[in-house]
Amino acid sequence: MRDYVLLYVNGRRCEVRGAAAFQPLSDLLRNEQRLVGTKIVCAEGDCGSCTVLLGRPRDGKLDYRPVTSCIQYVAQLDGAHVVTVEGLSEPGKLNPVQESFVANHGAQCGFCTPGFMASLAGLYETNCEPSRQDVTRALVGNLCRCTGYDSILASVAQVDGSKWQRLVERYPETKLVAELTEAAQESVTVVDEGRQILKPASLAEAVRMRATYADATILAGGTDLGVVWNKGKREIGTLLCLGEIPELREQTVAAGIWTIGAGVTLADVERTAVTILPQFAALLERFGSPPIKNAGTLGGNIANGSPIGDSMPGLFVLNAEVELVGPAGARRVNLNDFYTAYRKNVILPDELIARVVVPLPTAAERFACHKISKRRDLDISTFAAAILVQMNGDKVTAARIAYGGVAATIVRLPAAEAALVGKPLDDATLRAAGAAARAAVTPISDVRGSAEYRGLLAENVLLKLARELRAPQLAASSNGAAH
């Protein structure tokens, strides 16, 4: 068992011991590696100025994806290769994207520019001829206060993608993949003044560690915990790092069942959903920025238990089950029965979330989900909704409706569901169901919306979803409408 975190930074091997392993990656890069191109602004993962590329061994090669380094802690990065803006080009020579930004005035103050470079590098690693839409989606997580974005998009439009040097050419993979793969298979314990990092190499070892350290904080993607720690809202004690356990990163689709490991990133969930559940994929597109989704996990979103968690209303109506593992074995809990109060759930102190089991809609079922927020992208939900109905001809034979943002937990709405059964999906039926839904919810007023506004949404959103229910093929295209 190693007593240090092993990672590479711009091709250079780094062993991080003691207190240094408990800090954000951005601090390690700037203060210890002197790689000050990585900027820190919000320390919440929202602005993108600290974006770097994180490469991990996947199927015999390194898979590089942009992440926000301010909320990625060093403890999570064992077995990873970090590439900063300094590592995206040869010394003294700009890469094609950087050259185009200079030639086309893609930067003004330049403070945010390194983050843009990292996000665009992640795009060009897989797509050297991106469309304008590809570029805008890749840059959702990068904010600029100077340029208004037009010059940035114009700069990217002038890039000759054929000249892009992929990272495998700059950092030959043979040695990196071998050592990082081996590192990922090793257990790690780092201790520093009453704090400790535990990184098990397998799910079985994770269960044993969880039973021993019941008060440990589970750390996978860390996109919520990183913010809490950065803002001094919580102390770091014992961290149980689960993000790279192989059993937790598996996805399968078979016999109408989608099984998702708790450690699968939201980005990978979205990629799979595009072909098997496009309505859900369209929702996940708006879940957050690519750097957030490349780190955050589905298991973490469920465990976090926010009543405005974007993924959960859809999972509720799909009757998803959460598989929990502990010393006594595995058990499954329907997500509808998982939460007991605000951010409280039925997980026992010695249990972990292993996977999520999602029954996909059958040919007789129609599914739709929706998110309402102040901004279209990169914003927390004000209100979220999902519905699944089973049809026989033009009549509803069964219905499930779930809302987020209207109570202390995600809620099902049995009265509204009953108002649909036995009736056609016409406006009159949906208005009656909406009225029943509004009567059943008790929203609060906060910075994202008033209780009255959320009550109106509870009533009216069913009419919005009617289009998807009546014409399922339109669901993915209509789900992204701004509100």
Image (cartoon, rainbow, N blue to C red):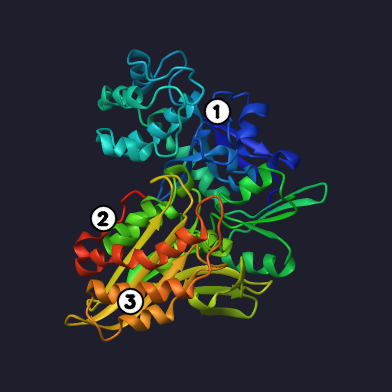
Q: State the CA–CA distance, disc 2 to disc 1.
A: 37 Å
Residue 478: numbered disc: 2
Q: Nearer the viewer, mark 2 or mark 1?
A: 2
Q: Residue furthest right?
A: 193
Task: Please determine whether, in this image, residue 398 is positioned above or below residue 251.
Answer: below
Task: Please determine whether, in this image, residue 105 is positioned above or below residue 447.
Answer: above
Q: State the CA–CA distance, disc 2 to disc 3.
A: 23 Å
Q: Which residue is mark 1?
A: 38
Q: Which residue is mark 3?
A: 432
User: At label 2, which amino acid type do we have?
Assistant: Ser
Which class describes the residues within 10 Å of circle 2: few (<14), some (14-19), or many (20+)? some
- Identify the mark nearer the N-term, 3 or 1: 1
Q: Residue furthest left?
A: 393
Which class describes the residues within 10 Å of circle 1: few (<14), some (14-19), or many (20+)? many
Task: Tell me residue 102's x, y (percent).
Answer: 38, 14
Task: Tell me residue 334's x, y (percent).
Answer: 49, 78
User: At label 1, which amino acid type do we have?
Assistant: Thr
Quarter of the figure with residue 317: bottom left
Along the viewing direction, whichever of 197 and 172 lies nearer the viewer: 197
Tag 3 near tag 1, CB within 8 Å: no
- Identify the mark nearer the N-term, 2 or 3: 3
Task: Tell me residue 188's x, y (percent).
Answer: 67, 52
Label count reads: 3
- Identify the mark nearer the N-term, 2 or 1: 1
Along the viewing direction, whichever of 60 and 143 lies nearer the viewer: 143
Residue 138: numbered disc: none
Q: Nearer the viewer, mark 3 or mark 1?
A: 3
> Which residue appears at 60% of the width and 34% of the height?
26
> Which residue appears at 72% of the width and 44% of the height?
232
User: At label 3, which amino acid type do we have?
Assistant: Ala
